[in-house]
Image (spheres, rainbow, N blue to C red):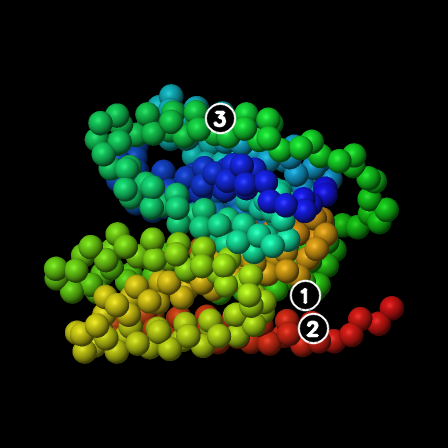
Amino acid sequence: MSTLPTTHWPRVFLLWGCGILAALQFAKISLAFQLLQTHYGVSPAQMGWVLSMVGVVGLTLGVSMGLLATKVGYRRLLVGGLSLGAVLAALQALDLPFYAFFATRVLEGASHLSVVVAAPTLMAAAAGPQHRSVAMGLWSTFVGTAFALCAAFGPSFLTLYGVHSLFALHAALLFLACAGVWRLIPEDAARLPDPVRTSLLARHVRIYTQWSTALPGLCFFCYTGMAVALLTFLPQALPPGQQWAAAALPFTGMAGTFGAGWLTRRLSPMRLLRWVYPLLALTGFACALAASAQSGYTAAALLLMAISGLAGGTAFALIPFLNKDAAQQARANGAVAQMGNLGATLGPPTFAFVLAQQPAWGLALPVVVLAVLGSTILRWGRRQQDTPVVH
């Protein structure tokens, strides 16, 4: 897959839209959580599995999908993922029994992974060298954008049309995106046979022992380990009269992730993360102090969300910065998908447990731990970058 000397912005925005539609596979269930729970007569724990199943599939198969992308082709994989997602969303609109609805969520995990592995690789190829970091910053906002759109328009849509119409709309948008990809994205190059046949386990080991493919995913884990938890727990401590900040927090995080794309045009992602992780730790402490003092908490919460978004966007920018080859980028995207789902799975219950034990400092402690972990991982990456390769 060749890259362009100049940026093809229609392709970039189309692929970003594909990512938003993939993230809606999470956001639509989050939006309709209580309605679906009542409709099916299931427990919150059962609905929790319905919500998280897409992420569980990503956790188990993320790297495998990155390896598959190099074999089937990025455009083919993206078209397949969008088509599968559209069919599954259309089935969900038919008011399936619970067991069948749950099965569609398992398959949506494969659809989601196909999109989040193939689309950013194609986006990097569609962006010129001068805009590649901006494109990756834009891509890194796809989850926040999906949740922000649901928060802004979803409740009114559900009130007017109902949850099954929401699934039908999602199916229609996925079909349109699939047609757009078929029309605008160039066909995949001829596939070359793999000269070295290795086991899937060996390829996983290769990805996580090669620092250029492992580092973006490990840094992204440090972001997703706090992102969903911060959106969940930061609003709970907002003072009376400042609940407006709960709606502003996702947009602040998105501003941070997109801002990373612009900043990495002037600073390398490695250098930017050297500053971001200490700032994360300091802002986490500032949030806890402000909550204890009952003064300045809203500003501290918004700042923490912005810096965490900056960490996530910069982790995405590491992919094209460290991996110039499309196959390497696909492997790194697979690791990012896997580590991102691991962080999103472990983060909220970890924050909830620590908050229950330490209400005053429970929010700051996991943030500081993840920031220190990120700094440690980054130091390892810098040592690898400075180590000369011996042939």
Asked whether, in this view, residue 255 is left or right of residue 9, the answer is left
- Of circles 1 and 3, the one toward us is 3
Tell me the quarter of the picture where residue 355 sits.
bottom left
Observer-nearest residue: 154 or 17?
17
Query: Distance between the Cα atoms at labels 1 and 2?
Result: 7 Å
Mark 1–mark 2 CB contact (< 8 Å): yes
| Residue identified by numbered label 2 | 384
What is the crowding at mark 3: few (fewer than 14 residues within 10 Å), some, or many (at least 20)?
A: some
The percent coordinates of residue 94 (x first, y second) are 38, 21
What is the crowding at mark 1: few (fewer than 14 residues within 10 Å), some, or many (at least 20)?
A: some
Observer-nearest residue: 34 or 139?
139
- What residue do we see at 26% from left, 31% from top? 157
Q: Which residue lies furthest to the front in this view?
A: 6
Who comes first in sequence, dot 1 or dot 2? 1
Q: Is residue 121 shown above or below 73?
A: below
Question: Which quarter of the rendered picture does the C terminus lie within?
Answer: bottom right
Who comes first in sequence, dot 3 or dot 2? 3
| Residue identified by numbered label 1 | 211
| Residue identified by numbered label 3 | 176
* Residue 151 seen by the camera: yes
Mark 3–mark 2 CB contact (< 8 Å): no
What is the crowding at mark 2: few (fewer than 14 residues within 10 Å), some, or many (at least 20)?
A: some
Amino acid identity at mark 1: Trp
Helix, strand or loop at disc 3?
helix
The percent coordinates of residue 120 (x first, y second) are 58, 46
Residue 329 image label:
none
Helix, strand or loop at disc 2?
helix
Query: Distance between the Cα atoms at labels 3 and 2?
Result: 43 Å
Query: Distance between the Cα atoms at labels 1 and 3?
Result: 38 Å
Helix, strand or loop at disc 1?
helix
Amino acid identity at mark 2: Gln
